[in-house]
Image (cartoon, rainbow, N blue to C red):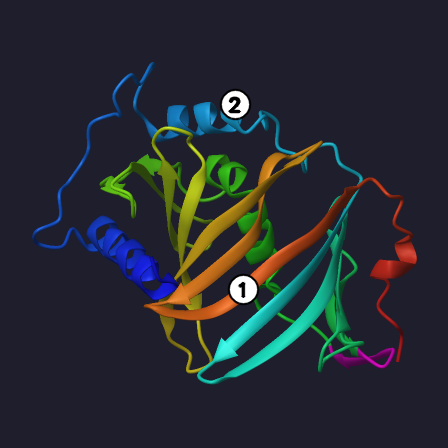
Amino acid sequence: MRASSLVAILMRSMICVIAGASGCTQYYDPPEGWKGEYTGAEVLNQALERADSRIDPMEGAEDLTVTAAIRTLRGAESVDATFVVRWKSPDRFAIEVIGGPFQGKRIVCDGTNIAEIVDGKVARSDVPREETGIAQLMNRLFVLHFFRSRAGTPAEMGQNARGPKDERWIHLQKSDANGRNYSLLLDATSLEPKVLRTMIPFEDGKERPVDTYFENYVIDPRAGRVSTLWKSYEGNKLREELRIGAIAWNQGIPDSQFAVPTP
C-alpha cells in the first residue's frame, strides 16, 4: 500500500471520530474481552500498565535530556534541524538547536523568565511559554500520562473508530488547562497510542487540527514504551516529522544551562 493511500485511510478514520461523518460506523461499546469499567480513567490505567509506565516518569525526576531531529515541510520546501531539550526540576528548561539553519539558537527558562538567546545574547525576553513548544513535546512524548493528568478536564470516552486494517481503535478526549481540545486514538487490542489530534495555532493566527501518528516504539527504563517517530499532518499533508534520538534521565545537568545572560 502506498504511503498516500495509508494516510487517506487514517484520515478517514479521524474524520469519523471527530466529526461523526455520515456513513461512518460508530463504536461506543468496549472491545471484546474488555475487563473492568469502560471509562477514560480505566482505559488509561490499563494502557499505562501495558506500557510498563504506571508512574509518571517526570515525578521524582531531577532532570531530563531529549535529543531529536525534525523535518518541517511547507509545500515543496523542507527544513531539517536537530535540537536538544533539557529540563530540570521543578520548572526549568532549555531548548538548543545544534544543527540546521538556526544552529546556536536557544530558548531558556530559568524558572521565571523565558528568553530567546542568539550568539550568547538575549534577543528577546518574556517569551510566551506556548511559543516554546515545550508542552507540545512533553505531551506527545508522554501522551498517556498527559491524558491522565489532572490539568484540564479528565479524559472521557469518545466515538471509537477502526484503523487502516479494520482494527478497533479506542477514542479518548481531553482539554488541557488552557481549554485546548485533544483527541487520542489507541489500538483496542494493545492499547498503544496511534494518533493524537491537537488544535495548533498557525502563522496566520488561526487554529487548525494537526494529527500526529506515533510509530517506532522503544522501551525507556523510566518511562516504559515511548514512540520515537512522530509524523504530523494538517489534513492529508505531512507537515512535520520528528525522530527522538535519545532520552536520558538524571544526568546532573548544571544550573548554568538554564541561566539567562544579563544584558
Extent of the magenta region: 118-124
User: Along the horizontal axis of the image, is 163 left or right of 51?
Assistant: left
Q: Which picture quadrant has residue 129?
A: bottom right
Looking at the rendered image, the quarter that the N terminus falls into is: bottom left
Q: Residue furthest left?
A: 23
Q: Amino acid at mark 2?
A: Glu
* Magenta stretch, main secondary structure class: strand
User: Residue 47's mark?
Assistant: none
Number of residues whose C-alpha sits closer than 10 Å to that of mark 2, classed few (under 14), some (14–19) or many (20 or more): some
Residue designated by label 2: 49
Give the SS element for disc 1: strand
Residue visible at 87% across and 78% down?
Answer: 120
Query: Is 119 colored magenta in this rendering?
Result: yes
Percent x, y for residue 3?
A: 38, 62
Residue 112 is at least partly visible in this image: no
Query: Is 160 colored magenta in this rendering?
Result: no
| Image depth: mark 1 or mark 2 in front | 1
User: Residue 241's mark?
Assistant: 1
Percent x, y for residue 96?
A: 76, 67
User: Along the horizontal axis of the image, is 209 left or right of 120?
Assistant: left
Number of residues whose C-alpha sits closer than 10 Å to that of mark 1, classed few (under 14), some (14–19) or many (20 or more): some
Q: Earlier in the sequence, mark 1 or mark 2?
A: 2
Residue visible at 34% across and 14% down?
Answer: 36
Q: In whole angstroms, how far apart are the C-alphas of marks 1 and 2? A: 28 Å
Residue 161 is at least partly visible in this image: yes
User: Along the horizontal axis of the image, is 259 left or right of 204?
Assistant: right
Q: Look at the numbered discs 1 and 2 and tell me whether their residues touch, using CB distance below 8 Å.
A: no
Looking at the rendered image, the quarter that the C terminus falls into is: bottom right
Percent x, y for residue 180?
A: 40, 56
Q: Amino acid at mark 1?
A: Glu
Residue visible at 28% across and 61% down?
Answer: 8
